[in-house]
Amino acid sequence: MKYVLAYPTESCFGLGCDPRSARAVRRLLVIKKRPVHKGLIVLVSDMQQLRPYVDDKVLAAVLASGYTAGRLTLLLPAGKRCPAWLCGRNGKVAVRWTDFVLAKRLCQQSRHALVSTSANRSGQRALRTAREVRRQFGAMVRVVAGQIGTARTPSRIVDWQSGRVIRD
């Protein structure tokens, strides 16, 4: 997938692409006007989709800790194979195991993780409808129709190693 998708998430429309594709990620960052040093969230439908991004020992420890699908994003040590463009300047990868039906289905159908960031230009409010996304981004993104969830805030982000809350 070399293109950028806009799709419904729990709280707003998200922008996503294949996290393995440098070209797709660059395109997403240009569309969003987001600097690469901030890093990106990797959205998965099951923890096995994390294998390219975190080492097996970290994956096993996260699963043993009781982490489940939902609105919690974990900042994990990036594995050796994790592309640098996902990590930003901190060398960690942000991971969210989604249980939101539409986003989960996209990951399942693509058979890999997706980048997930809010559909908006950096510093602006997140877009909540397909119509708003089309108005702002036009043909730059492919819009997946559907309704966003009922959450009013983005997912909480926690550094898994330190327990520090990055975003509440």
Image (spheres, helix red, strand yellow):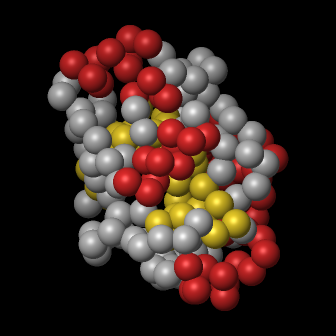
**Quick check: 76 above or below 43?**
above
Q: Residue at x 46, y 80 (%)?
A: 128
Task: Find residue 160 and report its horizontal and vertical position in percent.
Answer: 30, 34
Q: Is residue 43 left or right of residue 153?
A: right
Location of the N terminus by quadrant is: top right
Task: Find residue 137 and report its horizontal and vertical position in percent.
Answer: 70, 78
Task: Find residue 82 and report its horizontal and vertical position in percent.
Answer: 61, 27
Quadrant in the rendering for residue 19: top right
Q: Residue at x 76, y 55 (%)?
A: 3
Q: Residue at x 45, y 24 (%)?
A: 48
Residue reaching furthest to the left: 66
Residue 93 visible in the snapshot: yes
**Quick check: 56 above or below 100?**
above
Quadrant in the rendering for residue 45: top left
Location of the C terminus by quadrant is: bottom left
Task: Find residue 91 and report its horizontal and vertical position in percent.
Answer: 54, 34
Q: Nearer the viewer, residue 164 or 127?
A: 127
Q: Residue at x 53, y 59 (%)?
A: 117
Q: Nearer the viewer, residue 100 or 16?
A: 100
